[in-house]
């Protein structure tokens, strides 16, 4: 290790790290300015008489009254301020900025002015004072309740601002997931929202209490200064300064110690930190992504060994998946489900015929516009480029977005007008959104408890689902103690345990590594086989689309381009994005008698083109593209010059991206030996050729 890195790790300040004197000097003066008054109290305190001063009857009485007033003020602030903070953080409404300004106003308003304002509102001659006195006999001035009102007025903003900041940092997906599991908005607030923003709530409550304890100006102006009734500790200090300055200093020291104690306890976290921002630690020793029961699961097939993204030059085994691999995956899915059911495996899903059945019919309008019908037990993969409307479709079915509206019927029930928690549509977001303050068992039982199932029964059924998905031994763990694969299984168990009629999964495997993804994919495929409703899976992974889905729905700009079986979509993709996702070259154009006039320029000769003038898509497999250093002679009808721009590995083969000014960019797949013989490298000029019989033209 170098000496420089050792000094850095040891915290040794080097010359380059020294702050400039022009900034350091004013900063030191600011610290001195804030510290000297506090030192003044410490230096002037009569330490020998401190105990006597604090035990004097007047001080003890004022301290008791201050505690009563401050805790009542804290209670009122919690009762009124928590809903207000939630409203400001979660509900967009006209005048939001004005309401926030009103909340902040007591923090910048002189306390005496605040007292005058309270007097003109709640005093005997104020706006509400006469009515309160004549109707309820309530008089706030010169009464302890008046001191509580004054302290609440000046202290509640600390709670509202602190909690609003914590709520703003909490991503809504936790609350939305809880609603999809059947929890009402009030239940979501108390069981999910508040526990996850507890640090912000506690910090705001502590600051609110400390501010209420030290309130002076508004109290003396509105409630008066009556011993035993409204004379709190700050008012006691004010009176002692006139006759007993030493005692006033001792009481001031007490208030200073309380304030410093609160700030030290908060350690600067006055805005709070939502629980979901904590980093996930590594799993405990012995834990694996596949969970303790994975040894009993069969290994995934070849089609599950990798995944790929949408780019034409990206690599992965899935990119060469053709119709044969799609059929193989579908067969593997059916055989896996059949074997699981026949084996009596305790982790196998319940037989489909033993569950209720819910067909799906949805008319979606807005940004996403389509009609969707599916029989019970159907799994639909939703694919498309970013911004195509995939997530909007899911959120429309959940009733969680104003961008699109879904007229939704599940089975024989129209749930269009129902709120999200009554639709029986369970959602599994990309990261699972497990509630971090609950164990895996409590997470899984959450939906059942929200639907009124008794605690013991809910936990028993939740444990059954965890066992089925192979994570039963992890029931006691919190989400931070689970690996990515384990967390996704728990999230899936939680959704299935909630007894949904429609299951929507938003890229559930995207955050997992390849090995874990294959295992979780196998588990998901097995248990979807026994699901009595419809499942929609948003994915960018062709392996997921082929191996999990009965149908593939292709979206682009909110519209359905294709809705067909995985085999049909694999053989005849009607979207360039899907074709590239599957690893194909895809070129849009217009049909001609000989083939296709490409939109990007050039012509592709193909056999059996559609009628001339038909918009179409040319699909060419990368392995059908031949690469030459010289212009080829012979049968190829499509020959273009080009330049090598990128070479990437794809399993045991290489994928070569070639650009040309006479044809669209294309990807060729060749062996490393061929690449070496041709001397391929970035920038090398080459010729490419495609036989007319190797090009498939798909009408759009």
Image (spheres, rainbow, N blue to C red):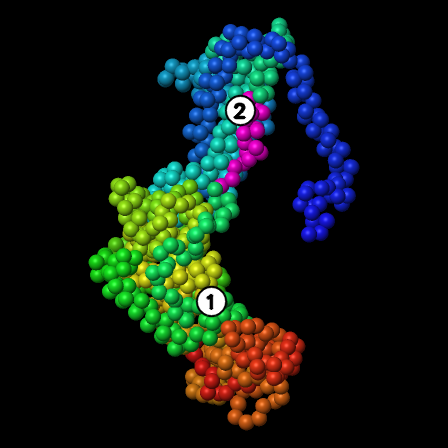
Query: Marks 2/1: CA distance?
Result: 56 Å
Q: Is residue 193 above or below residue 653?
A: above
Q: Residues within 10 Å of mark 1 (few under 14, many from 20)?
A: many
Q: Which residue is mark 1?
A: 307
Which residue is at the far top? Answer: 243
Residue 17, horizontal then vertical, whole percent: 73, 43
266 in the magenta segment: yes
Name which residue lies at 41% across and 57% down.
290
Residue range highlighted in magenta: 258-274
Disc 2 is placed on an element classified as helix
Depth check: 636 or 36 in front?
36
Residue at x 62%, y 7% (from the top left corner): 244
Between circles 2 and 1, the one closer to the viewer is 1
Looking at the image, tell me whether mark 2 or mark 1 is earlier in sequence order: 2
Residue indicated by mark 2: 210
Q: x and y percent of residue 386 in the render?
A: 49, 62
Image location (x, y in percent) of residue 90: 46, 42
Q: Secondary structure at mark 1?
A: loop
Q: Nearer the viewer, residue 668 or 520?
A: 520
Q: Which mark is residue 689?
A: none
Q: Residue at x 35, y 68 (%)?
A: 551
Residue at image point 46% right, 71% down: 318
Residue 191, given in percent of the width and then of the height, sits at 38, 39
């Amino acid at each position: 290790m170098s000496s420089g890195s050792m000094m850095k790790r040891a915290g040794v300040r080097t010359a380059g790290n020294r702050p400039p004197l022009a900034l350091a000097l004013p900063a030191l003066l600011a610290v001195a300015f804030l510290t000297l008054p506090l030192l003044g109290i410490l230096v002037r305190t009569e330490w020998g008489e401190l105990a006597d001063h604090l035990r004097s009857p007047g001080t003890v009485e004022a301290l008791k009254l201050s505690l009563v007033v401050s805790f009542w003020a804290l209670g009122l602030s919690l009762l009124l301020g928590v809903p207000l903070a939630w409203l400001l953080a979660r509900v967009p409404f006209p005048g939001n900025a004005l309401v926030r300004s009103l909340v902040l106003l007591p923090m910048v308003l002189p306390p005496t002015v605040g007292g005058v304002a309270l007097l003109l509102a709640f005093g005997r001659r104020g706006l509400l004072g006469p009515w309160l006195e004549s109707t309820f006999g309530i008089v706030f001035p010169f009464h302890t309740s008046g001191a509580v009102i004054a302290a609440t007025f000046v202290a509640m903003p600390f709670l509202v601002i602190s909690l609003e900041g914590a709520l703003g940092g909490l991503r809504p997906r936790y609350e939305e997931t809880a609603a999809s599991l059947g929890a009402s908005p009030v239940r979501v607030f108390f069981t999910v929202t508040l526990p996850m923003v507890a640090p912000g709530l506690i910090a705001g409550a502590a600051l609110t209490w400390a501010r209420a304890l030290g309130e002076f100006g508004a109290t003396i102006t509105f409630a008066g200064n009556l011993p035993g009734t409204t004379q709190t500790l700050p008012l006691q200090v004010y009176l002692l300064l006139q006759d007993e300055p030493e005692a006033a200093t001792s009481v001031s020291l007490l208030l200073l110690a309380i304030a410093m104690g609160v700030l030290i306890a908060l350690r600067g976290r006055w805005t709070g930190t939502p629980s979901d921002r904590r980093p996930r630690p590594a799993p405990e020793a012995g834990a694996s992504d596949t969970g303790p029961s994975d040894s009993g699961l069969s290994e995934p097939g070849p089609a599950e060994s990798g995944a790929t993204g949408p780019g034409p030059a990206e690599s992965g085994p899935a990119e060469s998946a053709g119709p044969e691999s799609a059929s193989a995956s579908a067969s593997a899915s059916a055989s896996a489900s059949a074997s699981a059911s026949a084996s009596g495996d305790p982790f196998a899903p319940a037989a489909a015929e033993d569950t209720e059945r819910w067909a799906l019919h949805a008319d979606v309008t807005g940004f996403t516009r389509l009609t969707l019908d599916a029989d019970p037990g159907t799994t639909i993969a939703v694919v498309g480029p970013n911004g195509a409307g995939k997530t909007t479709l899911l959120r429309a079915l959940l009733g969680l977005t104003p961008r699109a509206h879904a007229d939704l019927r599940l089975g024989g029930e129209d749930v269009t007008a129902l709120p999200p928690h009554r639709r029986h549509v369970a959602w599994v977001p990309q990261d699972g959104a497990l509630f971090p303050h609950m164990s895996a068992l409590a997470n899984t039982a959450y939906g059942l408890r929200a639907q009124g199932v008794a605690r013991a029964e809910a936990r028993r059924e939740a444990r059954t689902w965890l066992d089925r998905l192979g994570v039963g031994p992890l029931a006691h763990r919190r989400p931070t103690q689970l690996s990515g694969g384990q967390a996704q299984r728990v999230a899936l168990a939680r959704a299935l345990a909630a007894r949904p009629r429609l299951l929507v999964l938003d890229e559930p495997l995207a955050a997992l590594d390849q090995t874990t993804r294959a295992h979780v994919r196998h588990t998901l495929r097995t248990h979807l086989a026994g699901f009595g409703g419809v499942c929609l899976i948003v994915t960018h992974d062709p392996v997921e689309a082929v191996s999990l889905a009965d149908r593939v729905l292709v979206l682009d700009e909110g519209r359905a381009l294709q809705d067909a079986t995985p085999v049909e979509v694999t053989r005849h993709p009607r979207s360039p994005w899907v074709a590239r996702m599957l690893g194909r070259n895809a070129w849009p154009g217009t049909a001609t008698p000989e083939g296709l006039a490409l939109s990007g320029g050039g012509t592709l000769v193909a056999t059996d083109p559609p009628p001339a003038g038909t918009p179409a898509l040319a699909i060419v497999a990368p392995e059908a593209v031949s690469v030459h250093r010289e212009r080829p002679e012979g049968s190829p009808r499509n020959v273009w010059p080009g330049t090598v721009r990128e070479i990437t590995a794809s399993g045991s083969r290489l994928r070569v991206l070639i650009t040309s000014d006479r044809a669209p960019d294309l990807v060729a797949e060749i062996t490393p030996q061929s690449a070496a013989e041709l001397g391929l490298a970035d920038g090398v000029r080459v010729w490419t050729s495609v036989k007319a019989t190797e090009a498939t033209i798909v009408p759009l």
